[in-house]
Amino acid sequence: MTPDILITNAYILPEPGRAEAIVHGYIAVYNGRIDSIGPIEELPGRAAVEVIDARGGVVMPGLVNTHCHAAMTLFRGLADDLELVSWLNDHIFPAEAAHVTPEMVYLCSKLAAAEMVLSGTTFVADGYFFEDEAARAFSETGLRAVAAQGIIDFPAPGVPDPKEGVNSIARFLDDWKRRDPLITPAVFAHSPYTCSAKTLREAKELARLHEVPFFIHVAEGPQEHSMIQDIQGDTPVRHLDALGVLDERTVCVHCVWVDEEDIAILARRNAKVSICPQSHMKLASGMAPLADMLDKGVVVGLGTDSAASNNGLDLFREMDICAKVQKVRAMDPVAVQASNVLQMATSSGAEVLGFPEVGSLREGGIADLILIDIDQPHLQPFYGPDLLVYAAGGADVRTVIINGAFVVQDRQVLNVDLEETMAGVRKLAKSLR
Amino acid sequence: MTPDILITNAYILPEPGRAEAIVHGYIAVYNGRIDSIGPIEELPGRAAVEVIDARGGVVMPGLVNTHCHAAMTLFRGLADDLELVSWLNDHIFPAEAAHVTPEMVYLCSKLAAAEMVLSGTTFVADGYFFEDEAARAFSETGLRAVAAQGIIDFPAPGVPDPKEGVNSIARFLDDWKRRDPLITPAVFAHSPYTCSAKTLREAKELARLHEVPFFIHVAEGPQEHSMIQDIQGDTPVRHLDALGVLDERTVCVHCVWVDEEDIAILARRNAKVSICPQSHMKLASGMAPLADMLDKGVVVGLGTDSAASNNGLDLFREMDICAKVQKVRAMDPVAVQASNVLQMATSSGAEVLGFPEVGSLREGGIADLILIDIDQPHLQPFYGPDLLVYAAGGADVRTVIINGAFVVQDRQVLNVDLEETMAGVRKLAKSLR
């Protein structure tokens, strides 16, 4: 058979942070999967429907963003440099109450999807309201996603009656279960301070029933930590554990304020963790004890969080800042290394989302991959893959393939009308000011 | 008279972080200077030798990098994630001893210059050995520079006999004093732990005589702090003050390990400070007390340090990380704001280098400016200039004008043969491995 896509002349990282590079290699894609991969000398034939000469560029698995609220691109830069409480209560919550509609979620998730694929992300875990619209935006863009519908004990966009929260999620899961192989529906319980024990138990039960991931923001900042300690008499993680909602399909987002015992619990339950270093820094939540979590065998992925608290969705920048802030946190330049964050942004991220079929490049595996142009002044000389962490940016990604199909080609997004999308978002933004 | 360059339809930041934007403006450049600037309605005529429609893009002063060792691009990514002592002694120093030649400094500084202008830097303070060759590279690129020849009490590249250090600098200052209006020669004394009191006094005296800046690495890490405390019985800053080398033309690079009294001294002497947040994080030196220094009126600029400890020279990334790490350092999201770092990277940086004629855009001022394309998914919506800090990157810079001349046009560097330069650096890099 003739491959659909053949990439030659590439510096291939089959398992970033875990395995050696194939310094001069090829990769052949057929029917959504990697047909073969190896050193260029072993290339069986040179024909393909589409042949790409990587000209020495890097080919690696697409990046996995384990935490995002895509629709919040509308609030990107709306309110920076503020106290958390004022940021939320005076800016973000009022803006959400007034402006979150199905149309807004669709349009702004589309903008986010374009930004993500253009910066090398091929798989995102998203959580918001009207998540149906976000899922539609990802699906149309060709971006792999775990799309999680939110639940919270307050009236929320699309769910004015909080009692309807669980039903609304059940409908969403049914709707998207078999609609697009790229989209996995899931459940996002907002947090231990906005969801009752009953809500958390019911939402997790639903996720178990449907065998889908269950997300929750937990242990993000000092305020939450004190609040849960006061009300529940324990840490946020131990509170969740006591409720029985921590298992291998639970993704605990943030985990900045976790102590040794919390980390031991996360490890024991094989619960997954997503950290969002830039958001933690910008909102002054703190610095997650990443090295400790990795040491204890907790599987940790990277997330950008929303563009309202970052303010971008570029995982290259997230990898860089993550490694650097962890070094200064520990006052140890060896603490968290380039290889650690490369792994977090690829195979570990995929594991966090329950999707180990992506995040690495191997024969028979799913073809989610990106091509990076290193023939540029800021990426020369190129001694090895660490440079992708400490010097590359999303703008260096030339081509993106998801599920064997081109999504970005030579920096052009194929499935999104960018002009129309940006104009639509700008119009919404105007009404905000 | 007809302007050389007229930019219309621009969102202009005349003084980033300090003054309101001109939301829909124009800027006319004539004979190296800004002829006029204002709202588009006030544009006197629409003719010019070259007219650029910014299509809503941002025009701002070019960025000022107050600390770099350009030639060290050769060591970019050569040795990451290492203890400082091993990084220096086992990797960087041996590589420098074996590979620093005039040709290397010229070629690798050229690569750095290309990287800098492509990411919006129009003015750099560089320090190295064979600085003559670095100055030549900057001059040919059209990059404004303070080029500082290094002095150290050990045999160094080009200065095998440390006793010749001061003479070698004197020759360099004479050579470059009137050679290129874009290049200011200067003096770089390596540090208080590698230069004797005598060397420091003589080097500073020379800088005073020639009325040029005097740079010194000071208070970078805990090791230096203990060493100077042990030998001199005081902090590095107080040691320098006692030697009389701190004045308004002294640039203290790093200042991570400074206490309240040190900061008061820096403020009293009107000594300038350059901080390099990414390098401080990556080498685990610490987090500089930036908010305290700014509060006390110390003029602080941003530096990238070398590509060996960063690993890039993109000041947009430096601004972003600086603001974020300072917030988490203080556990206060208001601590250091986008406006602070925008000012540091422009007008304050220019002040640090003794060159207040650049760093802002005003009638009659020198025309060092950049044009940023915000019509991209990751920069939409655009509520204001904070987004340049928290979401933009060097790759978003389209056009760069230095001293009224195009240096980058539509992302093409005009004065550097990129292919040849990158090939040359790659060849040098091969001999390193």
Image (cartoon, coloured by chain):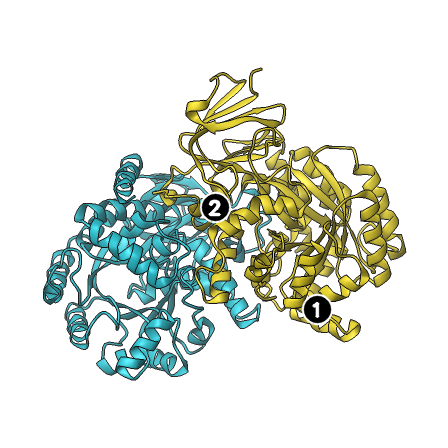
Chain colours: A cyan, B yellow
Residue B245 in percent (x, y) is at: 78, 57
- Tag 2, which chain? B
**Residues tagged 2 and 1 counted as in contact (Cβ below 8 A):** no
Q: Residue at x 45, y 64 (%)?
A: B332
**Secondary structure at numbered mark 2:** loop
What residue is shown with label 1? B224
A8 left or right of A112 in image = right
- In this orientation, which residue lies closer to the viewer: B302 or B13? B13
Look at the picture and state if A40 lies above or below B399. below
Residue at (45% x, 54% y) in the render: A317
* Residue B262 image offset from top left, x and y in percent: 68, 65
Q: Closer to the camera: disc 2 or disc 1?
A: 1
Q: Amino acid at mark 1?
A: Glu
Same chain, marks 2 and 1? Answer: yes
With B7 as the anchor, is A48 left or right in this view?
left
* Mark with earlier residue (2, 1): 1
Mark 2 lies on residue: B393
Q: Secondary structure at mark 1?
A: helix
Quarter holding the C terminus of chain B? bottom right
Give me the residue at 47% from left, 17% from top.
Answer: B46
User: Dividing the image into 4 quarters, which one contains the N terminus of chain B?
Assistant: top right
The amino acid pointed to by label 2 is: Gly
Can residue B282 be seen here? The reply is: no
Residue B341: give x, y in percent of width and height. Answer: 52, 51
Count of numbered circles in the view: 2
Q: Residues within 10 Å of mark 1 (few under 14, many from 20)?
A: some
Q: Quadrant of residue B30?
A: top right
